[in-house]
Amino acid sequence: MVVVVGRKHAGPLIVILLIVLLAAIVLFSSLSYKDLALPREIFASDAVELVGVGKSSISHHLLGSAYISQSESPFAFRDPAGTFSIKRSVLSASDHKFAFTINSQGFVKSLADARVSFNVLSTNGYGILVLKLNGKVIWSGVPESGSRIDSPLALEPGLLQEGENVITILTTSSGWRVWAPAKYVISDFSIMEDYTKKASTAIPLNLTNEDVETAMQDISGRLVATLYSTTPSMGKVRILVNNVSIWEGVPPSGSSYRIFADFSKTLTQLSESNLVVFSLEPSDGEDGNATGQGYFIDGIEVLVFRGENLTRHQVVDFELGGSEVQDLNEGRLRGEVSFSVSRVMKSGNISLILRNGNAEKVLFQTSPPGNDYNASVEFLGGDVVAGKNSLVFLSEDGMFEISKLRIALLPPEAKKA
């Protein structure tokens, strides 16, 4: 059905429409923006921000290798022949060989700085006495009759091997003296561990001032090393930094064992000059004999975890209008900041500060108990100004990842009890 309105009826209809329009204006004018658009998010971000140490790095300090042993006397591979003779001329030669077996990588490494020991009972001095290990010359000389040789050996890496090794003892030719071969008579020949090794070994650890000043508090450094047992019997190994124990244990026998030992700069009183000590405590075997225990410690390295660019804060700016601040002041609105501490990287306190250009207020301060810690805090009109305001996340002693940050205006009835 179509209704046609004539001109004579148009006037009253217009009046009715005007009355309805005025009523709507009056009704909507009684409602403020806050009734129509609350809660209102002023700022929202799911980005992960770092609060605490702004940048981290690791400095590496190589300390080499060490050996610790409870042996009362150095372990030696002794030639079972006892006394033997060698000779050589252009017409004939007679060398001497003996084999020994190394049953662990620990011995391979500990014998890398071994010593050779033997007696020269007699010689005519016509040739040079030569010692070879697995075909490689490791010592040579022209010792006199009646002399005792006790000399360190600088063995190349990889020359000794796990399993069988062969020592060859020979002399060079007497040359034109074809009727008189060069000759040596030798006794008590042995290859032995360096007898200067002890049950405790100290290694200096020198750091830079930057290492010390910027090292993180809780876990300042980590000592990394590989232990090789040199004997079937085992003992307790202890590692100390500046006389503070950072690791102790009994590594398994007959195999390599990787150590990771963390330490704090506060507990160890870390400075530019430090001392790392490896010690071995005896662990009696079934026969009650604690001698012979030993470990070769290789690849010793100290890592220092440093925090650089120590700004320790994150700043978030947001703006408010004059009417919003007025409503906050008069209690018609309240402000709320919510966030999540998604990860505690280093324990400590975290603070939330609100700055408005003229003043600042600590809204929140706590030590988060763990990851995924959610928090919210309220701010009022007196805490903010019309225009730019700033939230500052600050930590003087911890490191945290902050996420899910929200800044919102809420009606007062939404205030939590």
Image (cartoon, helix red, strand yellow):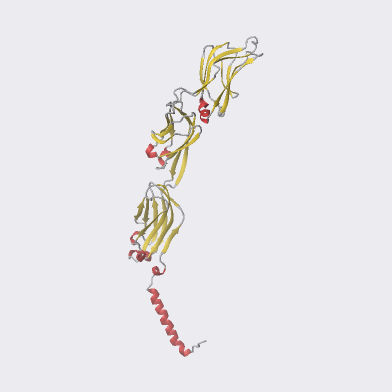
Is 77 situated left or right of 402 in this image?
right
Where residue 409 sits in the image (x, y, percent)? 39, 63
Q: Which residue lies most toward the front here?
A: 286
Q: Is residue 302 visible?
A: no
- Image position of 69 with respect to 12: above or below: above
- Image position of 74 with respect to 410: above or below: above
Where residue 344 sits in the image (x, y, percent)? 42, 49
Where residue 159 sits in the image (x, y, percent)? 57, 27
- Image position of 4 with respect to 57: above or below: below
Q: Which residue lies most toward the right here?
A: 91
Q: Using the image as rendered, state which of residue 85 and residue 386 is in the foreground.
A: 85
- Image position of 45 with respect to 327: above or below: above
Q: Is residue 114 visible?
A: yes
Q: Quadrant of the C terminus?
A: bottom left
Is 101 situated left or right of 46 in this image?
right
Q: Using the image as rendered, state which of residue 52 and residue 136 is in the foreground.
A: 136
Q: Using the image as rendered, state which of residue 71 and residue 394 is in the foreground.
A: 71
**Residue 157 figure quarter:** top right
Give the number of marks.
0
Where residue 129 sits in the image (x, y, percent)? 58, 16
